[in-house]
Amino acid sequence: MKQTIRLFLVALFAGAVTLGGYKYFEEEKLISFETPQQQSKFIPTTFSGTAAEMTTDFTEAAEKTVHAVVHVKNITVSRQPTNIIEYFRGGGQPRAMVGSGSGVIVSPDGYIVTNNHVIANATNLEVTLNNNKTYKAELIGSDPNTDIALIKIEDNDDFPFVPFGDSNNVKIGEWVLAVGNPFNLTSTVTAGIISAKARDLNQFDGNTQSFIQTDAAVNRGNSGGALVNTRGELIGINTAITSETGSYVGYSFAVPSNNARKVIEDILEYGNVQRGILGIQVGNINPQIVEKYGIDETQGVFVGGIEKGSGADKAGLKEGDIIKQLDGYKVTKFADLSGYLGSKRPSDIVEVTVMRNGKERKFPVKLEKLETFSIDDLGLEVKNMTREELKSRGLKNGVVVTRALTPEIARYKLEGIIITHLNDIAVENISDAERIMNQRDSRTPIKMTFMDTAGNINSFIFR
């Protein structure tokens, strides 16, 4: 009996020791996981946003939009020469090339906004709706500078369409949907937010760029499609992505709806795009400018010069002013200014708010028509000259180069030269330049005769 009790007590003690050891090591284990250094690896997964964020619903916007975003097929027929004789005669076997993109129906009678690069050089245009109905489309007009085009389809019934929203009111962080046909996957909807506004991707391409940047997935085939807000209003036309691979990597860009709307209205009313300008020369805010003018502003558009007789000149703007707002719209960089003016027309009155000598002043400026022409084959933009300007240079005719359109041409510093002849034909104005370039054989070199800024006459041959 004593032996039994002794064994029971030993077993009880051993069990207590075992249990205590387990508790001890288990507690040590828990403590090691709860040290502050280890805890930093854990990320809470509970949602702590606002009620509005938790209830964001894209279904209504998608339903409103998906039936009005169309698949655009571009069929281009060209002749492929098989020998040197056919090459010089422009002959050869006809060959059809097919490209595709997207478009947005913006009116019940079938007007469709898309990108210029979607329909460029088209022999035939076909449009397919979300209900699989296909229509022949007519090109109404296009504007390569903004990469916007207008086409039209016809039917006895009204078409579903997307109403325009006000792109000036979009906010960074706002939810948006991109609707289009990437990789021929029709009626695709992706969601994202507004990542940035007034993006200029290439200062040398001659285009007035002020893109809305989003992180909604956009790929080949989305071009010309809709960017809409959560109310289903059109706030942009998806146009480009930036990527090292050619596919979406998180950055997509859309032409603001205000600019697209203005372009198509101009095409319908005037047949071309009417561009209004302030009449200023823009400079950069750099240390030299800061020292010269005593500027302590870091944002805005610096007025580096005023064109004589322009709307800015008549209104009282001066060299050294810093433009901060247009009609109350905040301007922090040139793309803000150019984007806002891209939605305006000649003769519109714009209230320009500037900082001058540390004080804010406002000037109503009447916009004037931009009289320029982009000679794409030369990579140059030119504008007309007054008789007084020509006389002061000892010339009877010519157009002045305002800027280079490519980085390669920009290296030659051709701004300010006066082009007097193209292919030995006198150039009186930008209409002459446009006519000469349109009539030339695209396979022949271009001879440009010009006066440089030192007054010397020179010639370049572009091949």
Image (cartoon, rainbow, N blue to C red):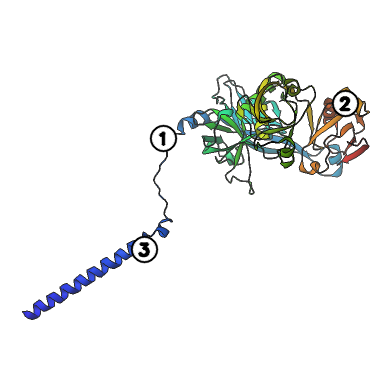
| Residue at image point 89% right, 26% down | 390
Position of 237 with respect to 429 (left or right) is left
Q: Residues within 10 Å of mark 3 (few under 14, many from 20)?
A: few
| Residue at image point 67% right, 40% down | 201
- Is residue 204 visible in the rendered structure shown here? no
Q: Earlier in the sequence, mark 1 or mark 3?
A: 3
Please name the residue that numbered disc 2 is placed on. Answer: 389
- Is residue 36 visible in the rendered structure shown here? yes
Residue 108, picture quadrant? top right
Tell me the CA gap for discs 1 and 3: 40 Å
Position of 371 with respect to 99 (left or right) is right
The secondary element bearing badge 1 is classed as: loop
Please name the residue that numbered disc 3 is placed on. Answer: 32
Please name the residue that numbered disc 1 is placed on. Answer: 55
Residues 248 and 372: in front is: 372
Q: Earlier in the sequence, mark 2 or mark 3?
A: 3
* Marks 2 and 1 in Cβ contact (< 8 Å): no
The secondary element bearing badge 2 is classed as: helix
The secondary element bearing badge 3 is classed as: helix
Q: Position of residue 158 (x, y in %)?
A: 55, 20
Position of 206 with respect to 324 (left or right) is right
The amino acid pointed to by label 3 is Ser
**Image quadrant occupied by the N terminus:** bottom left
Closer to viewer: mark 2 or mark 1: 2
Tell me the CA gap for discs 2 and 1: 63 Å
Q: Position of residue 152 (x, y in %)?
A: 64, 24
The amino acid pointed to by label 1 is Thr
The amino acid pointed to by label 2 is Glu
Position of 16 with respect to 367 (left or right) is left
Mark seen at residue 348 = none
